[in-house]
Image: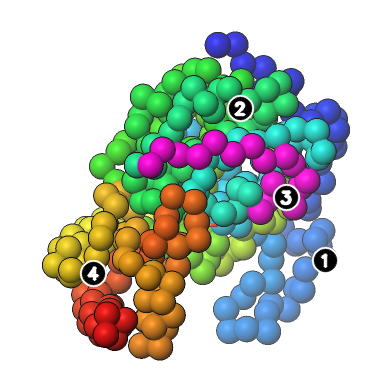
Amino acid sequence: MSFDLNSLLRPHIAKLQPYTSARDEYTGKEGVFLDANENPFGSITEQDFNRYPDPYQSALKAEIAKIKEVRSSQIFLGNGSDEAIDLLYRAFCNPGKDNVILLPPTYGMYEVSASINDVEIRKVALTEDFQLRPEEILKAADANSKILFICSPNNPSANKAKREDVLFLLQNFKGLVVVDEAYIDFSDEPSFTTELDKFPNLLVMQTFSKAWGLASLRLGMAFASEEIIRILNKIKPPYNISGLTQDTVLAAIADKGKVERMIREILDEREFLQGELEKQPFVQKIHPSHANFLLVKIPNATQVYDDLIGEKVIVRNRAKVLLCEDCLRITVGTREENEVLIKALVKVNLKIEK
Ligand SMILES: Cc1ncc(COP(=O)(O)O)c(C=O)c1O
């Protein structure tokens, strides 16, 4: 399939002259820096934050490139994945004219961000077992369908999409295909980053918020062709990733063994939690999980959810979400937290049955 990125791009973005920051204009490290209106005396805090950070996060990208086996020029870093989602809409979707294809039930920000940007949403529901409907997706698309969002492993269903379905869509969908892999580290599925050189219409999103345990730092990654990354860089706020985030994540990557141990622990706990839930007569179904949470069907889910709050255990009520009737989404906790959850679930269900 021939793919013309320029025909997808909004014309005014193609023409845009981006802001050039002080750190764009002079990239040297030595000298008396009087070009960015910074405070020369340091910071009010113990640690100094008075200098603007690298706008293109070069040192951090070089390390991410190594662990993700991509080129630095294929990486965009955002203030969480949510920033990349918003920038994609702003770059490619003309408000009131273009549309995007969403596959519910899925991550809510694709829809919210589309609505913020006044972009039409076309929904093609997943199957009962949360798989894609590739033919229906293509049927729903037209010449104004700019982006297809595929979340795999999917939130809230926790399963992974069939690889052949995603590949089929990459070959046949005429717009950008975004594969959101926020939970990929908890799956046995290889990342779609391995397909980047084959598919110029592919953008893969990952995040430091889940497996790396850095949700508060806000660091999301997008991997795509150099052309797509150049567009995102052109329209992002100049200093979108703080110096603190860049330095902290660089140090975290240097200690990569730790994240592998944490993932192993979460996977062990997922197995423990699943085993304990399976023993409970009130649990109707636990959907197969490739993520750090379980989607669990429990009768009277909303009542269970409310009563769990009474026990100071907070899960996510997904009972009103398409195909998730009577389902709670439960994040895998520590062993202690998982035991507290199971105890509370038993208690509230005994009360409900009475
Ligand atoms: C599928 C999916 N993508 C993206 C995100 C957000 O990631 P970030 O914290 O990088 O904005 C989430 C958060 O829950 C998610 O479930």
**In the image, is 31 to the left or to the right of 245?**
right
Q: Looking at the image, which residue is at 58% across and 22% down? A: 139
**Residue 160 in the image, given as x and y percentages of width and height:** 35, 41
Judge depth for marks 2 and 4 and give the one in front.
4
Residue position for label 2? 140
Q: Which residue is mark 4?
A: 282
Query: Can the viewer see residue 290?
Result: yes
> In which quadrant will I find the N terminus?
top right
Which of the two discs, 4 and 3, sits closer to the camera?
4
* 116 versus 234 height, above or below: below
User: Callout 1, which amino acid?
Assistant: Asn
Mark closer to the chain start, 4 or 3: 3
Which-is-in-front pick, marks 2 and 3?
2
Q: Which residue is mark 3?
A: 115
Q: Measure how far apart labels 1 and 3 are at the Cα level.
A: 37 Å
Magenta stretch contains residue 257: no
Q: Quadrant of residue 327?
A: bottom left
Vertical position of residue 74 compared to residue 305: above or below:
above
- Sequence order check: which comes first, mark 4 or mark 1? 1
Q: Quadrant of the C terminus?
A: bottom left
Q: Nearer the viewer, residue 279 or 16?
A: 279
Q: For the residue carrying disc 2, how many other residues have a C-alpha within 10 Å: few (<14), some (14-19), or many (20+)?
A: some
Under circle 4, the secondary element is loop
